[in-house]
Amino acid sequence: MKMAKLSRRVAALFCAALALWWLVRAQGGGIFATRARALGLGDGTERLAGTTNFWERLALGQSPYLRQGRVLASPDRALSAADPDGGEDQADPPPAQWEQEEDVPLSQSQPEGRDIVAQTFLPATDGSYPSAGGVYLYNRTDQAVDMEALAQAPITLTGQGKGPEILIVHTHATEAYTQTDQDVYTESDPYRTTDDGHNVLRVGDEMAAAFAQAGLNVLHDRTLHDYPNYNGAYTRSRQTVEEYLAAYPSISLVLDVHRDAMEGDHTIYKAVADPDALPDCAQVMLVVGTDQGGADHPNWRQNLSLAIALEAAMNERAPTLARPIALRTSAYNQQLSVGSLLVEVGTHGNTLQESIAAARTFAQVSAPVIAQLLGK
């Protein structure tokens, strides 16, 4: 009796496995592509789901990175190391780049022995990056952008009266860098710390000091908008910015300073400027938000014009400091004021000292442009 029951169970399992095998072949992977879309994994994952086998598709669905909403940059849109002046390519770009979206904390810790690869990220020159005067745009939106027209458009800052001219805030203030013997900190979360001597607050301090030395009036807000709760950080930083704008109508620029995160194939990438020109210096990326995500943000093109002007100054006075400008669908609170930008200083693979050098250099080369726009 027991043998008969066991035989029936084995037969049922065999039939179920056979049916699953037939379904996979018949659907051509479609069910798993649907699963990827349901997870909100983006075009890169859908592309992979349609070309990989059953077990690979299953692994995609189980990936903690993909479950968090991260997307693999498609090879033709990944940052390449092509020389913008038409020279020969430098080192190969990372084979896959994970790009961290807002309110998605890194899930990994800082394990010993993890590969950290230095890369100077420069734009592709194959036409996939719109450009004007050597300034390139990584357009991650559906918005049509005329870079030449925006580069020539007048930039009008809206601050009025005397007082603070630049506001530096940090939506993700606890973001930190790879630890070294010189810079050791206690993590609040992976690659994050509330130690303001080792997170992006320290980078903001350096940036504010360089702006002040150039004669600009700066406010540096030190609120930890992402601690103890990471989600909702942009809502909290929005309130902070609104309060500053109401208290100081003279504010003309709002810079939300972050650090980026890039990794793929178990490798962490750190963005570094050309060591011959800027030794021990991270790269900087300006991020411009749009209204594509639904925000009431009609003036995003003015912010992009400002980013183009600052990027041109970096290219002229500190070549390779700047990565291509990133245009994204989210607004990042930039709808609150004309002259608002998000500034990514280094990645989690960079050291704090490299990022401090980048922040200082960014402020030094940007200050003359800002001063001119302010009529100083």
Image (cartoon, rainbow, N blue to C red):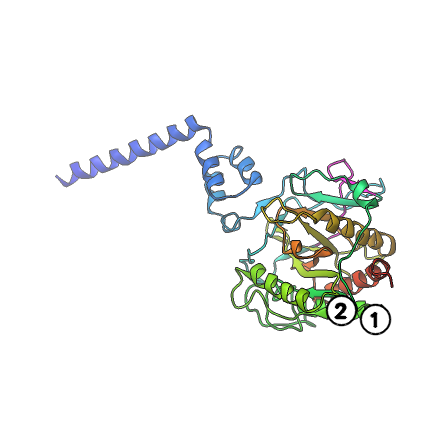
Q: Residue furthest top?
A: 26
Magenta segment includes 325: no
Q: Residues within 10 Å of mark 2 (few under 14, many from 20)?
A: some
- Look at 65% across and 68% down and name the residue there: 199
Q: Secondary structure at mark 2?
A: loop
Judge whether residue 176 can be spotted in this image. no
Q: Which residues are magenta?
A: 118-132
Query: Which residue matches tag 2?
Result: 164
In the image, is 235 to the left or to the right of 35?
Answer: right
Secondary structure of the magenta portion, mostly? loop
Residue type indicated by callout 2: Pro
Magenta segment includes 124: yes
Indicate the position of residue 221 as horizontal and vertical percent values. Answer: 67, 69
Q: Is residue 232 above or below residue 125?
A: below
Mark 1 vs mark 2: give the one in front: 2
Among the two numbered marks 1 and 2 on one chain, the one whose residue lies closer to the N terminus: 2
Q: Secondary structure at mark 1?
A: helix
Query: Which residue matches tag 1?
Result: 213
Judge whether residue 114 can be spotted in this image. yes
Q: CA distance from mark 1 to mark 2?
A: 14 Å
Q: Closer to the camera, 317 or 290?
A: 290
Q: Is residue 67 above or below residue 224?
A: above
Q: Residues within 10 Å of mark 1 (few under 14, many from 20)?
A: few
